[in-house]
């Protein structure tokens, strides 16, 4: 069954995906490549280091000034193909080697591209960094376009600084095949097979588990996973999602500490998780700002509208994807941090922080009945120390909630208004606008894609590891992944 499964994976599913860089940045990158070929480009220090960029988030960052480009000049796409060929030739060690390097190369590319976009977005709107506008008045909204030009220039410089032009394997991936392979984790079925054949059974189980988190409905991989965890030599407590976001360990660690009444440590972990969660999601959102194939030649405003709509739905999917934690989906996971923080701060008698965490939670759950009671308890115990600052939700929570609500309204507006145009419209003033049917079709396709994807995700979430309950092996598979003797959080607990 495993061989049949991988054979299915070999057939390439080709469909349009957006490419990964803005047009302006690509032009400059082409120049950079030309300069490098003339011998004018310089190389940076090859040391990879961790930095603490306050301009974005107080989280871990990596310097990609000299990426680990293979000596033969191959890209991670080439390494992926070499890994597949090694699998087909039964060369299991080579298969593992090339596929692992392909994953590492793609992760470097993903992080460097996303981090450049994040840095440049911040730099363009930071007055201290960019200085004043070129002109004092915002005539014809030109300051908006000045910021775009500044971001384009920043992206070009950042791409050269991090040598991203060495990592442009998708520039000729016109049908989006390889983008789909890496974003949909389609190399993991190969890795599973090669890990098994090379007797790396724990890694094989982790590869299967990783793929199932992304594709919980895949029955073949479910069976492979069940077989893997029964293999001799398996270390079940070491099975984990190889693509897990960094915030997850912090969040779960904070919840475990809360359950064990380690309040100060719980606070530290949960606060760090909030910062890392925002950073991880912003990376995903920034990666959505790549190229977009319109399918026709739109005018200036139409091109902006189409491209923005495509990026908007991609970014909204990032929020949904962040909710998948160790095989279970949690809707709107971000505000749960504040629910746990409110309790932790209360137990160390930091009443203002506790109250503000509770107010932040209520931004997202206005109908919650338990949190207002908890806040009233704080008011009673704090007595005369309650001030106006108690009632202010935290800044990052306000900004996150505002963005989420605005994007929901934009998505609804796009769907409703372009549905109206599709039906012929009811307002005479709309007649003649967007005369190009391709414009309407492009925007509508974006809406339909998101609706279909959210429907499929919802169905998939209901099935996540249902086999652990429906088809029980001799012992509970889920409990073996997270052993019963583990204190605190396990995969059955609600966050």
Image (tube, rainbow, N blue to C red):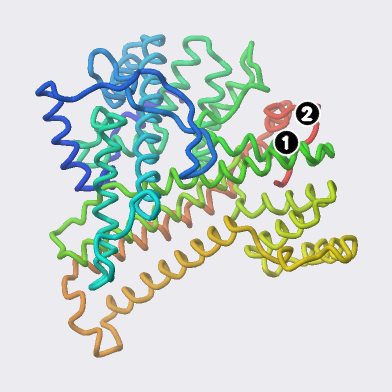
Q: Quadrant of residue 259?
A: top right
Real-space Cα separation, disc 1 to disc 2, in angstroms: 8 Å
- Tell me the residue that label 2 is attached to: 486
Frontmost residue, 55 versus 453: 55
Q: Position of residue 31 (x, y in %)?
A: 13, 35
Is 244 located above or below residue 459 in the figure?
above
Q: Secondary structure at mark 2?
A: loop
Which residue is at 64% across, 55% downward?
Answer: 335
Q: Quadrant of residue 163?
A: top left
Which residue is at 78% across, 28% downward?
Answer: 486
Which residue is at 70% across, 63% downward?
Answer: 359
- Tell me the residue that label 1 is attached to: 490
Mark 1, Cα crowd under 10 Å, few <14 / some 14-19 / many 20+, is: some
Q: Are marks 1 and 2 in contact (CB under 8 Å)?
A: yes
Q: Position of residue 63 (x, y in %)?
A: 40, 28
Frontmost residue, 223 versus 272: 272
Q: Is there any visible trace of residue 492 in the rendered image?
A: no
Q: Position of residue 249 (x, y in %)?
A: 63, 34
């Amino acid at each position: 069954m495993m061989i049949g499964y991988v054979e299915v994976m070999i057939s390439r599913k080709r469909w349009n995906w957006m490419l990964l860089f803005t047009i302006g940045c690509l032009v400059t990158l082409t120049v950079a490549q030309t300069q490098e070929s003339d011998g004018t480009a310089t190389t940076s220090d090859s040391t990879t280091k961790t930095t603490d960029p306050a301009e974005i988030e107080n989280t871990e960052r990596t310097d990609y000034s000299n990426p680990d480009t293979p000596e033969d000049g191959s890209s991670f796409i080439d390494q992926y193909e070499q890994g597949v060929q090694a699998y087909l030739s039964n060369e299991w060690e080579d298969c593992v080697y090339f596929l692992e390097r392909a994953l590492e190369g793609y992760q470097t590319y993903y992080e460097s591209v996303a981090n450049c976009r994040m840095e440049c977005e911040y730099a363009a709107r930071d007055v201290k960094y960019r200085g004043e506008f070129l002109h004092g008045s915002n005539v014809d909204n030109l300051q908006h376009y000045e910021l775009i030009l500044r971001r384009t220039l920043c992206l070009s410089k950042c791409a050269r600084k991090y040598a991203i032009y060495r990592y442009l394997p998708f520039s000729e991936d016109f049908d989006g095949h390889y983008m789909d392979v890496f974003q949909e984790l389609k190399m993991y079925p190969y890795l599973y097979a090669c890990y098994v054949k090379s007797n790396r059974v724990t890694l094989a189980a982790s590869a299967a588990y990783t793929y199932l988190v992304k594709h919980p409905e895949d029955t073949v991989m479910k069976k492979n996973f069940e077989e893997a965890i029964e293999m001799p030599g398996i270390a079940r407590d070491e099975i984990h999602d190889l693509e897990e976001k960094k915030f997850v360990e912090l969040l779960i660690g904070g919840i475990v500490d809360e359950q064990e009444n380690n309040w100060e440590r719980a606070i530290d972990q949960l606060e760090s998780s909030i910062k890392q969660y925002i950073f991880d999601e912003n990376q995903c959102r920034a990666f959505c700002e790549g190229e977009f194939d319109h399918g026709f030649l739109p005018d200036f405003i139409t091109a902006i509208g189409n491209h923005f709509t495509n990026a908007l739905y991609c970014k909204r999917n990032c929020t949904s994807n962040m909710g998948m934690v160790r095989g279970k989906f949690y809707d709107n996971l971000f505000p749960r941090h504040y629910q746990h923080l409110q309790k932790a701060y209360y137990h160390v008698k930091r009443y203002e922080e506790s109250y503000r965490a509770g107010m932040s939670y209520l931004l997202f759950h206005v109908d919650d009945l338990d949190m207002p009671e908890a806040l009233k308890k704080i008011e009673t115990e704090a007595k005369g120390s309650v001030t106006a600052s108690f009632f202010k939700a935290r800044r990052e929570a306000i900004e996150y909630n505002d963005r989420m609500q605005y994007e929901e309204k934009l998505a609804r507006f796009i769907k409703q208004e372009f549905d109206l145009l599709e039906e012929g419209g009811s307002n005479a003033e709309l007649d003649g606008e967007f005369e190009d049917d391709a414009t309407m079709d492009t925007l509508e396709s974006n809406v339909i894609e998101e609706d279909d994807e959210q429907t499929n995700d919802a169905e998939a979430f209901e099935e996540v590891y249902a086999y652990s309950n429906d088809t029980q092996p001799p012992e509970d598979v889920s409990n073996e992944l997270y052993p019963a003797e583990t204190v605190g959080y396990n995969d059955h607990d609600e966050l």
